[in-house]
Image: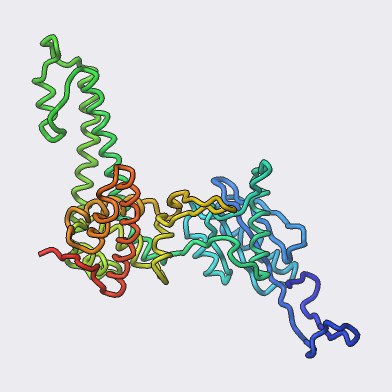
Amino acid sequence: MLSSFSDQTTWKEDPVSTTATTRAIEGTAIEVGLFMSFELGEREWRIAWATSLGEKPRLRTLRARDTKRLLEEIEKARSAVNARRVVSCYEAGRDGFWLHRFLHAQGIENRIVDSASIEVNRRARRQKSDRLDAEKLLSMLLRESLGERDLWSRVNVPSAADEDARSLQREYRTLVKERTRSANRILGLLASQGLAPERIDAQLPEWLARVRLWDGSALLPGVRARILREFERWQFTHAQLLGIEKERRDRTRNLEERGLDQVRRLFALKGIGLGAAWTYGLEFFSWRRFRNGKQVGALAGLAPTPYQSGDLEHELGISRAGNRWVRGLSIEIAWGWLRHQPRSALSLWYQERFARGGPRARKVGIVALARKLLVELWRYVEMGVLPEGAQLKA
């Protein structure tokens, strides 16, 4: 057990006790460690630190992202207890991984904790403040240091290069949403006037100039100007999307970056487009090290959650934990797999087991197919094992 009182502790066997071990443990040095937790806010950071589980935590508050002051506080705390080892933790959030890399560069062990895995009292109302959050994280960090297992879930931290490789595909998803919002606003404004264009493209301004309302009159200038301004935003976003699509194709074809080899393997399969290959390859498979298929399904949030209590036993559905982008995409790819890979073993399994059922049975079955397919694709990109019966593109 860690102690804050002495660096040297000697344990000797009690010759009277009948439960004493037959071998004395002498001269065991217990190294004092400094344990810290961060509660990261937008304007302020709160730090709690202690050296043992029974010790009352010390609290410090400093300006957010003030790394100079942070190192000064850590050095003061380290000197006060004469600690050689410093261990810290904070919840995964908007600050991302830069603080983790900064702490590691200073020789500090750090853990990034999944917020959903932090235990709470299910019976009582839970008070919520930065001080209590920091103290809760600190107590769990100390318990982990004492050997308590499965206490929380740590976030797998990618390298700076792996994190940067995900930027292009994430930006693409964001721009698709923005373009869809602009298109929906344009369609909504036109619908309020009783109009519906065939499509939204470069000819929309000309169409607005000649279109007529139900009474034969032209669009009023206020509505028309508003639609044109929204169309300019749509055009700008659409042009950015076309540029990203071109860059994505060029990089996939010509570059040898880490993860792109897996992207090319996935894109070679029928039923998987370039966007899906980029999300799977760079977001999920390239920098993570899965040990088995269960970890693959769990990280995508496709793992089952059984409920069993006494004679009561039923399934609560999928966990929905993990990467939501991959989880949503895996369902889409599963439907496309049935269409483009009808003779594969997975498609035949689905047809035999779920195709004759109703809509609910098919929806349940597609989730099961998505989980199986995700595991098969992981084996394909990692071990080169092609899914049974699957076909490659020409």
Q: Is residue 157 left or right of residue 269?
A: right
Dividing the picture into quadrants, the one containing residue 304 is bottom left
List the single residue furthest toward the bottom: 23
Q: Nearer the viewer, residue 118 or 257?
A: 118
Q: Nearer the viewer, residue 254 or 22?
A: 22
What's the residue at 42%, 72% (across, down)? 291
x and y percentages locating residue 326 in the rendered image:
35, 55
At x 35%, y 61%, the residue is: 284
Q: Is residue 320 left or right of residue 331?
A: right
Compared with 116, 392 (above or below) is below
Give the tally of numbered discs.
0
The quarter holding residue 359 reads: top left
Q: Is 201 above or below relative to 6? A: above
**Towards the viewer: 386 or 91:** 386
Q: Position of residue 171 (x, y in %)?
A: 31, 50
The residue positioned farthest toward the top in the image shown: 215
- Where 264 falls versus 224 (above or below)? below
Look at the image and tell me in which quarter the N terminus lies. bottom right
On the question of residue 152 being in view, the answer is: yes
Tell me the quadrant of the picture where the C terminus can be found: bottom left
Residue 103 quadrant: bottom right
In this picture the colour scheme is: rainbow
Image side of residue 371 versus residue 108, left or right: left
Q: Can you give x and y, in whole percent of width and height, for residue 51 in the image?
A: 72, 66
